[in-house]
Image (tube, rainbow, N blue to C red):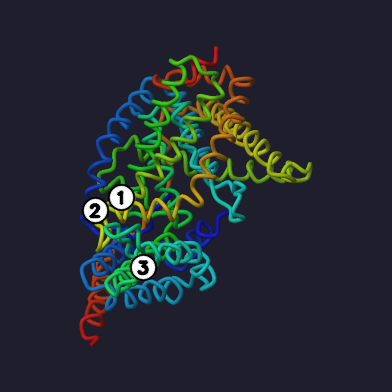
Protein backbone atom coordinates (compact mmCIF):
# COMPACT_ATOMS: atom_id res chain seq x y z
CA UNK A 1 0.00 0.00 0.00
CA UNK A 2 2.63 2.49 -1.02
CA UNK A 3 1.67 6.09 -1.60
CA UNK A 4 3.61 7.29 -4.59
CA UNK A 5 6.15 10.05 -4.84
CA UNK A 6 4.46 13.42 -5.16
CA UNK A 7 0.96 12.07 -4.49
CA UNK A 8 0.40 13.77 -1.13
CA UNK A 9 0.24 17.56 -0.79
CA UNK A 10 3.46 18.91 0.80
CA UNK A 11 1.82 19.75 4.14
CA UNK A 12 0.42 16.24 4.52
CA UNK A 13 3.72 14.67 3.53
CA UNK A 14 5.49 16.78 6.14
CA UNK A 15 2.89 16.08 8.84
CA UNK A 16 3.17 12.29 8.38
CA UNK A 17 6.96 12.52 8.46
CA UNK A 18 6.74 14.41 11.76
CA UNK A 19 4.27 11.82 13.09
CA UNK A 20 6.56 8.91 12.16
CA UNK A 21 9.83 10.41 13.32
CA UNK A 22 9.51 9.75 17.09
CA UNK A 23 8.70 6.06 16.56
CA UNK A 24 11.63 5.57 14.21
CA UNK A 25 14.04 7.55 16.40
CA UNK A 26 13.11 5.62 19.55
CA UNK A 27 13.58 2.38 17.61
CA UNK A 28 16.86 3.65 16.17
CA UNK A 29 18.19 4.49 19.63
CA UNK A 30 17.29 1.00 20.78
CA UNK A 31 18.93 -0.58 17.75
CA UNK A 32 22.03 1.59 18.15
CA UNK A 33 22.36 0.55 21.78
CA UNK A 34 22.00 -3.13 20.93
CA UNK A 35 24.53 -2.79 18.12
CA UNK A 36 26.95 -1.06 20.47
CA UNK A 37 26.63 -3.63 23.25
CA UNK A 38 26.52 -6.73 21.11
CA UNK A 39 28.74 -6.21 18.10
CA UNK A 40 27.73 -9.53 16.61
CA UNK A 41 24.14 -8.33 16.20
CA UNK A 42 25.00 -5.76 13.52
CA UNK A 43 25.08 -8.27 10.75
CA UNK A 44 22.16 -10.27 12.11
CA UNK A 45 20.05 -7.13 12.04
CA UNK A 46 21.31 -6.18 8.61
CA UNK A 47 20.57 -9.68 7.32
CA UNK A 48 17.07 -9.51 8.78
CA UNK A 49 16.49 -6.16 7.10
CA UNK A 50 17.79 -7.45 3.78
CA UNK A 51 15.47 -10.42 4.17
CA UNK A 52 12.52 -8.09 4.79
CA UNK A 53 13.30 -6.21 1.59
CA UNK A 54 13.52 -9.37 -0.48
CA UNK A 55 10.36 -10.76 1.12
CA UNK A 56 8.47 -7.64 0.10
CA UNK A 57 9.74 -8.09 -3.46
CA UNK A 58 8.46 -11.68 -3.79
CA UNK A 59 5.41 -12.10 -5.95
CA UNK A 60 2.47 -13.73 -4.22
CA UNK A 61 -0.45 -15.33 -6.00
CA UNK A 62 -3.58 -13.27 -6.05
CA UNK A 63 -7.10 -14.46 -6.73
CA UNK A 64 -7.91 -11.60 -9.08
CA UNK A 65 -5.14 -12.73 -11.42
CA UNK A 66 -2.88 -9.81 -10.77
CA UNK A 67 0.16 -10.45 -8.64
CA UNK A 68 1.12 -8.63 -5.53
CA UNK A 69 3.65 -8.60 -2.75
CA UNK A 70 3.58 -9.51 0.93
CA UNK A 71 4.16 -6.68 3.36
CA UNK A 72 5.96 -8.73 6.00
CA UNK A 73 4.28 -6.52 8.60
CA UNK A 74 3.07 -9.41 10.72
CA UNK A 75 6.23 -11.48 10.49
CA UNK A 76 8.39 -8.51 11.48
CA UNK A 77 6.23 -7.53 14.42
CA UNK A 78 6.06 -11.11 15.73
CA UNK A 79 9.79 -11.84 15.43
CA UNK A 80 11.37 -8.47 16.26
CA UNK A 81 8.71 -6.47 18.08
CA UNK A 82 7.32 -3.14 16.87
CA UNK A 83 10.18 -0.69 17.72
CA UNK A 84 12.83 -2.64 15.81
CA UNK A 85 10.35 -3.30 13.01
CA UNK A 86 9.86 0.47 12.71
CA UNK A 87 13.59 0.91 12.06
CA UNK A 88 14.04 -2.04 9.69
CA UNK A 89 10.76 -1.21 7.96
CA UNK A 90 11.79 2.40 7.38
CA UNK A 91 15.04 1.34 5.75
CA UNK A 92 13.20 -1.24 3.67
CA UNK A 93 10.75 1.40 2.49
CA UNK A 94 13.65 3.72 1.68
CA UNK A 95 15.27 0.98 -0.40
CA UNK A 96 12.00 0.27 -2.16
CA UNK A 97 11.94 3.91 -3.22
CA UNK A 98 15.63 4.00 -4.15
CA UNK A 99 15.91 0.64 -5.91
CA UNK A 100 12.43 0.04 -7.32
CA UNK A 101 10.81 3.52 -7.45
CA UNK A 102 8.09 1.98 -5.30
CA UNK A 103 6.77 4.60 -2.89
CA UNK A 104 8.74 7.81 -2.69
CA UNK A 105 10.99 10.11 -0.74
CA UNK A 106 8.47 12.87 -0.01
CA UNK A 107 5.85 10.27 0.92
CA UNK A 108 8.30 8.14 2.93
CA UNK A 109 6.94 9.46 6.24
CA UNK A 110 3.35 8.54 5.35
CA UNK A 111 4.37 5.08 4.15
CA UNK A 112 6.49 4.48 7.24
CA UNK A 113 3.54 5.43 9.40
CA UNK A 114 1.15 2.97 7.78
CA UNK A 115 3.51 0.07 7.05
CA UNK A 116 6.30 0.25 9.62
CA UNK A 117 4.39 1.65 12.60
CA UNK A 118 0.60 1.21 12.52
CA UNK A 119 0.55 -2.24 10.91
CA UNK A 120 3.22 -3.79 13.14
CA UNK A 121 1.69 -2.40 16.35
CA UNK A 122 -1.71 -3.83 15.42
CA UNK A 123 -0.13 -7.20 14.56
CA UNK A 124 1.83 -7.22 17.79
CA UNK A 125 -1.19 -6.35 19.93
CA UNK A 126 -3.31 -9.03 18.25
CA UNK A 127 -0.61 -11.68 18.58
CA UNK A 128 -0.24 -10.90 22.28
CA UNK A 129 -3.99 -10.76 22.73
CA UNK A 130 -4.50 -14.11 21.02
CA UNK A 131 -1.83 -15.67 23.23
CA UNK A 132 -3.48 -14.23 26.34
CA UNK A 133 -6.83 -15.67 25.26
CA UNK A 134 -5.18 -19.06 24.90
CA UNK A 135 -5.74 -19.40 21.14
CA UNK A 136 -3.40 -21.79 19.34
CA UNK A 137 -0.25 -20.08 18.08
CA UNK A 138 -1.11 -20.66 14.42
CA UNK A 139 -4.43 -18.84 14.88
CA UNK A 140 -2.66 -15.96 16.58
CA UNK A 141 -0.10 -15.69 13.82
CA UNK A 142 -2.77 -15.80 11.13
CA UNK A 143 -4.92 -13.14 12.79
CA UNK A 144 -1.93 -10.94 13.55
CA UNK A 145 -0.58 -11.03 10.00
CA UNK A 146 -3.98 -10.66 8.35
CA UNK A 147 -5.29 -7.86 10.57
CA UNK A 148 -1.92 -6.09 10.53
CA UNK A 149 -2.14 -6.10 6.75
CA UNK A 150 -5.69 -4.78 6.85
CA UNK A 151 -4.74 -2.10 9.38
CA UNK A 152 -1.97 -0.94 7.06
CA UNK A 153 -4.43 -0.64 4.24
CA UNK A 154 -7.03 1.21 6.35
CA UNK A 155 -4.40 3.70 7.53
CA UNK A 156 -3.32 4.31 3.91
CA UNK A 157 -6.95 4.89 2.93
CA UNK A 158 -7.28 7.37 5.82
CA UNK A 159 -4.15 9.18 4.71
CA UNK A 160 -5.50 9.50 1.17
CA UNK A 161 -8.96 10.53 2.37
CA UNK A 162 -7.46 13.23 4.61
CA UNK A 163 -5.46 14.55 1.69
CA UNK A 164 -8.31 14.39 -0.82
CA UNK A 165 -11.69 14.75 0.93
CA UNK A 166 -14.68 14.22 -1.32
CA UNK A 167 -16.17 17.51 -2.59
CA UNK A 168 -19.69 16.30 -1.75
CA UNK A 169 -19.36 14.08 1.30
CA UNK A 170 -16.01 15.14 2.80
CA UNK A 171 -13.64 12.85 4.65
CA UNK A 172 -16.16 10.05 5.25
CA UNK A 173 -17.11 9.78 1.61
CA UNK A 174 -13.51 9.84 0.46
CA UNK A 175 -12.60 7.19 3.02
CA UNK A 176 -15.33 4.84 1.82
CA UNK A 177 -14.24 5.42 -1.79
CA UNK A 178 -10.60 4.58 -1.10
CA UNK A 179 -11.49 1.64 1.13
CA UNK A 180 -13.88 0.25 -1.50
CA UNK A 181 -11.41 0.58 -4.38
CA UNK A 182 -8.60 -1.16 -2.55
CA UNK A 183 -10.78 -3.73 -0.77
CA UNK A 184 -11.06 -5.74 -3.99
CA UNK A 185 -7.37 -6.55 -3.93
CA UNK A 186 -6.42 -6.01 -0.31
CA UNK A 187 -8.84 -8.27 1.55
CA UNK A 188 -7.86 -11.46 -0.33
CA UNK A 189 -4.21 -10.42 -0.11
CA UNK A 190 -4.42 -9.99 3.64
CA UNK A 191 -5.85 -13.49 4.00
CA UNK A 192 -3.13 -14.93 1.74
CA UNK A 193 -0.43 -13.13 3.66
CA UNK A 194 -1.89 -14.48 6.90
CA UNK A 195 -1.65 -18.05 5.56
CA UNK A 196 1.89 -17.57 4.28
CA UNK A 197 3.00 -16.10 7.59
CA UNK A 198 1.65 -19.13 9.45
CA UNK A 199 3.76 -21.46 7.30
CA UNK A 200 6.81 -19.20 7.68
CA UNK A 201 6.50 -18.92 11.46
CA UNK A 202 6.02 -22.68 11.73
CA UNK A 203 9.27 -23.34 9.91
CA UNK A 204 11.04 -20.78 12.09
CA UNK A 205 9.77 -22.35 15.29
CA UNK A 206 10.59 -25.89 14.16
CA UNK A 207 14.02 -25.33 12.71
CA UNK A 208 15.51 -22.26 14.19
CA UNK A 209 15.31 -22.25 17.93
CA UNK A 210 18.99 -21.21 17.93
CA UNK A 211 18.54 -18.31 15.56
CA UNK A 212 15.56 -17.03 17.48
CA UNK A 213 17.60 -17.27 20.68
CA UNK A 214 20.34 -15.28 18.98
CA UNK A 215 17.72 -12.66 18.25
CA UNK A 216 16.45 -12.68 21.80
CA UNK A 217 18.50 -9.56 22.46
CA UNK A 218 15.67 -7.88 20.65
CA UNK A 219 13.45 -7.69 23.67
CA UNK A 220 9.87 -7.20 22.67
CA UNK A 221 9.72 -9.86 19.99
CA UNK A 222 6.61 -11.78 20.85
CA UNK A 223 7.53 -15.16 19.47
CA UNK A 224 9.97 -16.33 22.12
CA UNK A 225 7.19 -17.01 24.61
CA UNK A 226 5.39 -19.23 22.13
CA UNK A 227 8.49 -20.88 20.70
CA UNK A 228 9.47 -22.83 23.73
CA UNK B 1 20.33 -7.95 -10.41
CA UNK B 2 18.17 -4.86 -10.32
CA UNK B 3 18.09 -2.69 -13.44
CA UNK B 4 18.15 0.56 -11.49
CA UNK B 5 21.23 -0.55 -9.58
CA UNK B 6 23.11 -1.51 -12.73
CA UNK B 7 22.47 1.84 -14.41
CA UNK B 8 23.19 3.75 -11.22
CA UNK B 9 26.74 2.36 -11.20
CA UNK B 10 27.46 2.66 -14.92
CA UNK B 11 25.85 5.87 -16.19
CA UNK B 12 27.83 8.85 -17.41
CA UNK B 13 27.00 10.96 -14.32
CA UNK B 14 28.07 8.28 -11.87
CA UNK B 15 31.00 10.35 -10.56
CA UNK B 16 29.15 13.61 -10.28
CA UNK B 17 28.73 14.54 -6.63
CA UNK B 18 25.38 13.19 -5.34
CA UNK B 19 24.70 16.58 -3.74
CA UNK B 20 24.52 18.19 -7.16
CA UNK B 21 22.04 15.64 -8.47
CA UNK B 22 20.04 15.88 -5.24
CA UNK B 23 19.89 19.68 -5.55
CA UNK B 24 18.54 19.34 -9.09
CA UNK B 25 15.90 16.86 -7.93
CA UNK B 26 14.97 18.93 -4.88
CA UNK B 27 14.57 22.01 -7.06
CA UNK B 28 12.38 20.17 -9.57
CA UNK B 29 10.24 18.69 -6.78
CA UNK B 30 9.82 22.11 -5.14
CA UNK B 31 8.71 23.58 -8.47
CA UNK B 32 6.39 20.62 -9.01
CA UNK B 33 4.70 21.21 -5.66
CA UNK B 34 4.70 25.01 -5.70
CA UNK B 35 3.24 25.75 -9.13
CA UNK B 36 -0.08 24.66 -10.69
CA UNK B 37 0.37 21.04 -11.71
CA UNK B 38 -1.07 21.32 -15.20
CA UNK B 39 1.46 24.00 -16.13
CA UNK B 40 4.60 22.72 -14.43
CA UNK B 41 4.32 18.93 -14.33
CA UNK B 42 5.06 18.27 -18.04
CA UNK B 43 8.15 20.50 -17.88
CA UNK B 44 9.39 18.78 -14.73
CA UNK B 45 8.78 15.38 -16.28
CA UNK B 46 10.70 16.13 -19.47
CA UNK B 47 13.50 17.84 -17.58
CA UNK B 48 13.97 14.70 -15.51
CA UNK B 49 13.72 12.55 -18.65
CA UNK B 50 16.28 14.60 -20.57
CA UNK B 51 18.67 14.67 -17.63
CA UNK B 52 18.43 10.89 -17.34
CA UNK B 53 18.56 9.90 -20.99
CA UNK B 54 20.51 12.73 -22.68
CA UNK B 55 22.57 13.85 -19.72
CA UNK B 56 23.46 10.65 -17.92
CA UNK B 57 23.03 8.46 -21.05
CA UNK B 58 20.81 5.95 -19.29
CA UNK B 59 18.86 4.03 -21.96
CA UNK B 60 15.35 5.36 -22.44
CA UNK B 61 14.02 1.83 -21.96
CA UNK B 62 15.41 1.77 -18.43
CA UNK B 63 13.68 5.06 -17.65
CA UNK B 64 10.32 3.84 -18.92
CA UNK B 65 10.88 0.53 -17.17
CA UNK B 66 11.13 2.33 -13.85
CA UNK B 67 8.09 4.47 -14.68
CA UNK B 68 5.84 1.62 -15.85
CA UNK B 69 4.55 0.33 -12.52
CA UNK B 70 3.97 3.78 -10.93
CA UNK B 71 2.09 4.84 -14.08
CA UNK B 72 -0.24 1.85 -13.74
CA UNK B 73 -0.89 2.71 -10.09
CA UNK B 74 -1.62 6.32 -11.01
CA UNK B 75 -4.15 5.19 -13.61
CA UNK B 76 -5.79 2.91 -11.05
CA UNK B 77 -6.05 5.79 -8.59
CA UNK B 78 -7.82 8.18 -10.97
CA UNK B 79 -11.40 6.93 -10.39
CA UNK B 80 -11.12 7.42 -6.62
CA UNK B 81 -10.24 11.06 -7.15
CA UNK B 82 -12.45 11.84 -10.13
CA UNK B 83 -15.69 10.28 -8.89
CA UNK B 84 -17.54 12.00 -6.12
CA UNK B 85 -19.59 10.04 -3.60
CA UNK B 86 -22.81 11.60 -2.29
CA UNK B 87 -24.18 10.02 0.86
CA UNK B 88 -27.01 12.49 1.59
CA UNK B 89 -29.72 11.37 -0.80
CA UNK B 90 -31.55 8.07 -0.93
CA UNK B 91 -28.64 5.65 -0.98
CA UNK B 92 -25.08 6.37 -2.04
CA UNK B 93 -24.71 8.14 -5.37
CA UNK B 94 -21.57 8.26 -7.47
CA UNK B 95 -21.17 11.23 -9.76
CA UNK B 96 -18.51 12.62 -12.02
CA UNK B 97 -17.82 16.26 -11.29
CA UNK B 98 -15.62 18.72 -13.20
CA UNK B 99 -13.79 19.57 -9.97
CA UNK B 100 -13.13 15.87 -9.36
CA UNK B 101 -11.72 15.45 -12.85
CA UNK B 102 -9.51 18.53 -12.42
CA UNK B 103 -8.24 17.22 -9.08
CA UNK B 104 -7.51 13.77 -10.51
CA UNK B 105 -5.63 15.28 -13.45
CA UNK B 106 -3.62 17.63 -11.25
CA UNK B 107 -2.67 15.03 -8.65
CA UNK B 108 -1.81 12.36 -11.21
CA UNK B 109 0.30 14.70 -13.34
CA UNK B 110 2.10 16.11 -10.32
CA UNK B 111 2.84 12.64 -9.03
CA UNK B 112 3.97 11.42 -12.44
CA UNK B 113 6.47 14.29 -12.66
CA UNK B 114 7.68 13.59 -9.11
CA UNK B 115 8.19 9.90 -9.92
CA UNK B 116 10.22 10.95 -12.97
CA UNK B 117 12.48 13.00 -10.65
CA UNK B 118 12.87 9.96 -8.41
CA UNK B 119 13.65 7.83 -11.46
CA UNK B 120 16.38 10.27 -12.48
CA UNK B 121 17.90 10.15 -9.00
CA UNK B 122 17.90 6.39 -8.64
CA UNK B 123 19.05 5.67 -12.19
CA UNK B 124 22.07 7.97 -11.86
CA UNK B 125 23.12 7.61 -8.22
CA UNK B 126 24.03 4.38 -6.40
CA UNK B 127 22.35 3.87 -3.05
CA UNK B 128 25.59 4.07 -0.98
CA UNK B 129 26.23 7.56 -2.40
CA UNK B 130 22.76 8.65 -1.34
CA UNK B 131 23.27 7.15 2.11
CA UNK B 132 26.51 9.08 2.51
CA UNK B 133 24.60 12.21 1.58
CA UNK B 134 21.85 11.36 4.09
CA UNK B 135 24.46 10.95 6.81
CA UNK B 136 25.78 14.43 6.08
CA UNK B 137 22.25 15.79 6.15
CA UNK B 138 21.84 14.50 9.70
CA UNK B 139 20.33 11.01 9.58
CA UNK B 140 21.37 9.08 12.74
CA UNK B 141 24.72 7.32 12.05
CA UNK B 142 23.45 4.01 13.46
CA UNK B 143 20.63 4.00 10.92
CA UNK B 144 23.00 4.80 8.07
CA UNK B 145 25.43 2.09 9.14
CA UNK B 146 22.63 -0.45 9.28
CA UNK B 147 21.37 0.69 5.89
CA UNK B 148 24.85 0.25 4.36
CA UNK B 149 25.09 -3.32 5.60
CA UNK B 150 21.53 -4.04 4.53
CA UNK B 151 22.19 -2.72 1.06
CA UNK B 152 25.08 -5.12 0.62
CA UNK B 153 23.10 -8.08 1.90
CA UNK B 154 19.98 -7.31 -0.15
CA UNK B 155 21.69 -8.52 -3.29
CA UNK B 156 22.99 -11.65 -1.62
CA UNK B 157 19.52 -12.53 -0.35
CA UNK B 158 17.88 -11.68 -3.68
CA UNK B 159 20.11 -14.17 -5.42
CA UNK B 160 19.26 -16.84 -2.88
CA UNK B 161 15.58 -16.10 -3.22
CA UNK B 162 15.55 -16.47 -6.99
CA UNK B 163 17.56 -19.70 -6.80
CA UNK B 164 15.20 -21.15 -4.18
CA UNK B 165 12.16 -20.10 -6.15
CA UNK B 166 13.51 -21.70 -9.29
CA UNK B 167 14.09 -24.92 -7.38
CA UNK B 168 10.55 -24.84 -6.03
CA UNK B 169 9.11 -24.17 -9.46
CA UNK B 170 11.10 -27.04 -10.95
CA UNK B 171 9.44 -29.28 -8.35
CA UNK B 172 5.95 -28.01 -9.25
CA UNK B 173 5.71 -25.98 -6.05
CA UNK B 174 3.54 -23.30 -7.67
CA UNK B 175 1.17 -25.57 -9.58
CA UNK B 176 -1.97 -24.83 -7.61
CA UNK B 177 -3.08 -22.11 -5.24
CA UNK B 178 -2.60 -24.34 -2.19
CA UNK B 179 0.92 -25.42 -3.07
CA UNK B 180 1.79 -21.80 -3.86
CA UNK B 181 0.84 -20.69 -0.36
CA UNK B 182 2.85 -23.52 1.15
CA UNK B 183 5.86 -22.91 -1.10
CA UNK B 184 5.90 -19.19 -0.39
CA UNK B 185 5.72 -19.78 3.35
CA UNK B 186 8.59 -22.24 3.15
CA UNK B 187 10.52 -19.85 0.93
CA UNK B 188 9.99 -16.97 3.36
CA UNK B 189 10.86 -18.95 6.48
CA UNK B 190 13.81 -20.72 4.85
CA UNK B 191 15.13 -17.48 3.42
CA UNK B 192 15.05 -15.90 6.86
CA UNK B 193 17.16 -18.71 8.30
CA UNK B 194 19.56 -18.49 5.39
CA UNK B 195 19.87 -14.74 5.80
CA UNK B 196 20.63 -15.00 9.51
CA UNK B 197 23.16 -17.73 8.84
CA UNK B 198 24.75 -15.60 6.15
CA UNK B 199 24.89 -12.62 8.52
CA UNK B 200 26.45 -14.69 11.25
CA UNK B 201 29.13 -16.14 8.96
CA UNK B 202 29.90 -12.72 7.54
CA UNK B 203 30.29 -11.40 11.06
CA UNK B 204 32.66 -14.23 11.99
CA UNK B 205 34.75 -13.66 8.89
CA UNK B 206 34.94 -9.94 9.50
CA UNK B 207 35.73 -10.40 13.19
CA UNK B 208 38.64 -12.64 12.20
CA UNK B 209 39.93 -9.73 10.15
CA UNK B 210 39.69 -7.22 12.97
CA UNK B 211 36.22 -5.76 12.39
CA UNK B 212 35.20 -3.42 15.19
CA UNK B 213 31.88 -2.22 13.93
CA UNK B 214 33.07 0.13 11.25
CA UNK B 215 33.84 -0.73 7.68
CA UNK B 216 36.38 1.68 6.26
CA UNK B 217 36.39 1.70 2.50
CA UNK B 218 38.55 3.78 0.25
CA UNK B 219 36.07 5.50 -2.00
CA UNK B 220 36.41 7.87 -4.90
CA UNK B 221 35.13 11.09 -3.39
CA UNK B 222 33.66 13.26 -6.16
CA UNK B 223 34.20 16.98 -5.75
CA UNK B 224 31.34 19.36 -5.28
CA UNK B 225 31.51 21.69 -8.26
CA UNK B 226 30.08 25.21 -7.89
CA UNK B 227 29.67 25.39 -11.64
CA UNK B 228 27.50 22.28 -11.77
CA UNK B 229 25.49 23.39 -8.72
CA UNK B 230 24.79 26.65 -10.54
CA UNK B 231 23.83 24.68 -13.66
CA UNK B 232 21.37 22.61 -11.63
CA UNK B 233 19.76 25.77 -10.23
CA UNK B 234 19.68 27.28 -13.72
CA UNK B 235 17.97 24.19 -15.13
CA UNK B 236 15.30 24.38 -12.44
CA UNK B 237 14.80 28.08 -13.15
CA UNK B 238 14.35 27.33 -16.86
CA UNK B 239 11.69 24.75 -15.97
CA UNK B 240 9.91 27.29 -13.77
CA UNK B 241 10.12 29.97 -16.48
CA UNK B 242 8.72 27.59 -19.11
CA UNK B 243 5.84 26.76 -16.78
CA UNK B 244 5.10 30.41 -16.07
CA UNK B 245 5.16 31.71 -19.64
CA UNK B 246 2.71 29.03 -20.74
CA UNK B 247 -0.79 30.37 -21.37
Residue found farthest to the right: B171
Judging depth in this view, the residue of B55 and B75 nearest the camera is B75
Q: Residue furthest bottom?
A: B247
Q: Vertical placement of B178 versus B130: above or below? A: above
* Mark 3 to mark 2 CA distance (whole Å): 16 Å
Q: Position of residue A186 (x, y in %)?
A: 49, 47
Find numbered disc 1 in the image and state the secondary structure of the residue it sits on.
Answer: helix
In the displayed orientation, state which residue is furthest to the top: A228
Residue B28: percent from left, percent from top: 28, 68
| First in sequence: mark 2 vs mark 1 | 2
Which residue: 28% across, 51% down? A172
Tell me the subunit letter for badge 1: A
- State the residue in front, B228 or B235: B235
Q: Is residue A149 left or right of residue A107?
A: right
Question: What is the count of numbered marks?
Answer: 3
Residue at numbered disc 2 = A12
Q: Say yes or no: labels 1 and 3 on the same chain.
A: no
Mark 2: few/some/many CA within 10 Å (<14, 14-19, 20+): some
What residue is shown with label 3? B108
Q: Quadrant of residue A174?
A: bottom left
Mark linked to residue A159: 1
Secondary structure of the residue carrying tag 2 is: helix
Mark 1 and mark 3: Cα distance apart in space: 16 Å
Q: Is residue B119 above or below residue A155?
A: below
Q: Chain of mark 3?
A: B
Q: Residues within 10 Å of mark 1 (few under 14, many from 20)?
A: many
Amino acid sequence: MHIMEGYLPPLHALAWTVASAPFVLVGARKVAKVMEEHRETRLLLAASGAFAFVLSALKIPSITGSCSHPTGVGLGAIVFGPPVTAVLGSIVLLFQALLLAHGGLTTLGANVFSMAIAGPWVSFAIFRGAAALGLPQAAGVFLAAMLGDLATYCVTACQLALAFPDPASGFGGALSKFLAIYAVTQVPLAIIEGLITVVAVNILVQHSRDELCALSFLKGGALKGGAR
Amino acid sequence: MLATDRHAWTNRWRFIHPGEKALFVAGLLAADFALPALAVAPQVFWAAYLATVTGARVPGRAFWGVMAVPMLFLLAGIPALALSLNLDGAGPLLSLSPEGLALAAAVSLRSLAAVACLAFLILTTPVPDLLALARRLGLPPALVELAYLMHRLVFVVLERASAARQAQEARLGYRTFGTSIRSLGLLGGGLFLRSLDRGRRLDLGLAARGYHGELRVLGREPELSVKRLALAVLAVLVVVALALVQP
